[in-house]
Image (cartoon, helix red, strand yellow):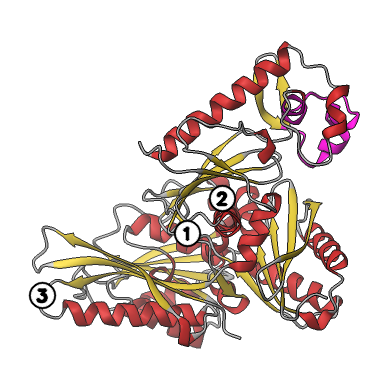
Amino acid sequence: MIEEALRVGIDVGGTNTDAVVLDAADRVVAKAKRPTTPDVTEGLRAALDAVLAEAGAAAPDVRRVMLGTTHATNAVLERRNLGRVAVLRLGAPATTSVPPLCGWPADLREAVCAGQTVVAGGHYVDGREIGPLDRDAIRRFLDGVAADAVAVTGVFSPADGGHEREVAELVGREYGLPVSLSHEVGSLGLLERENATVLNAALYGVAAHVVEALTAALAGRGLAARPYLAQNDGTLMTVEHAARLPVATIGSGPANSLRGAAFLSGVAEAIVADVGGTSTDLGVLVGGFPRESAAAVEIGGVLTNFRMPDILAIALGGGSVVREHGVGPDSVGYRITEEALVFGGGTVTMTDAAVAAGRVPPGLADRREALRRDDLMRAAVARADEMVADAVDRMALGRGDRPLVAVGGGAFLLAPRIPGASRVVRPDHAEVANAVGAAIALASGRVDTILPAGESRSKAIERAKEEAAARAVAAGADAAQVEIVDLVEVPLSYLSEPAVRVHVKAAGPLAR
């Protein structure tokens, strides 16, 4: 008898859509994989149907559904279903030398930009106003564009977002358009934060489609479960929160895999290799959460600076095509069961080479004898081992004492021992670690700001903690159980008054 209060985790990957059902004791009671479909949504529904059928779960038993999806990523990469954005920067005349969207690929800029301008307003790094907000210039600009949303970026708005909020009030009151505010999206760094804010505004329609599709899928199956979306830091947010910050779902897949790997293995400090059908994503667990990238992250040819997991992707997966010159980067993807030799097809893949070498996944043990291990397959396995060892070395940063947790449907490809890792851990249910990561995730909120370093510093940090906790509650966390899980202070030099940059992250279990 399955316990009540079931949770469903779903993760949409490039090759497969994975789903799991967890009970109240965090046990995996059902799991399923289905091919990811071109429109993504059909694969999501198929995986949901399959996992519910395996669990035999009655509709009232499912209380929550958590989704990690590639919808937003695909929309940016394919320049598809993006909204038209009025791009508004606050900071004239100081910031006019580099216009908004500078460096964007021409096709993405054309798809997104409804118009752009720089008007007076914004703040210095210490919170002082550069100048008064020019509301008349904002009205003239918006009167002349046809946009689906507005993206507002103020100079140093993480230190003081007052002018951005004033613009949001004006736009909502007089134009009725949704507004993306940069101090809610990114951290310091004007151009990268602006880029992330514009992408966020362009994705409002995509987010609405995802939420509508998910809620319709649940309603069509008689599920009254509350839906959540996974964020790129390995935590969750409500669908209402996701509607405002859809860009935060980019990178949720790798983050889910890392969180799932930590949960299934019980290892909080490790390198994780998530081996899929087309690629292998490597990341690092620090305290059970993904190590975040310290560098600007490029998405669809655009540099952004919101928080993303530190991920290294290599072109190695179970469907990678093997040829005389090497492995991949092309893959048969979800067609592996039709095209790989081990399934009776005519294409030599990394799955074939691994099975011939004795690295056999469950269900294929009887196929090994049918494969002849030739020089091509031996070379492919050796090349794959070299690729993994090199990637582990790059992620380890000189440390060789951490284990490597192998997850993903292609985890069997990895060697029993890997240079740079103390050991290889292969947990149960590793093939659906990404969906498990979505199902067990916490809700979180963060603040990245600049505070005075004088006597008022401690009180200002307490206010930042309170704001981060409030954002976590807005994302769906239980207010009584929210904790500060990360606090970083970095002194800033060459300012008229001493100041520190403060990053605060709060997280907690979902509210009941």
Above or below for 131 versus 80: below
Query: Is residue 352 a member of the stretch shown in magenta?
Result: yes
Above or below for 113 versus 165: above
Q: Give whichever of discs 1 and 2 has the lower sequence position.
A: 2
Residue topped by disc 2: 108
Give me the residue at 71% from left, 40% from top. 277
Q: Position of residue 82 (x, y in %)?
A: 63, 60
Between the C-alphas of marks 3 and 2, the distance is 44 Å
Q: Nearer the viewer, residue 140 or 445?
A: 445
SS under mark 2: helix
The quarter in which the C terminus is drawn is bottom right
Is residue 204 visible in the rendered image? The answer is: no
Residue topped by disc 3: 454
Amino acid marked by disc 2: Leu
Residue 191 found in image quarter: bottom left
Is residue 273 visible in the rendered image? The answer is: yes
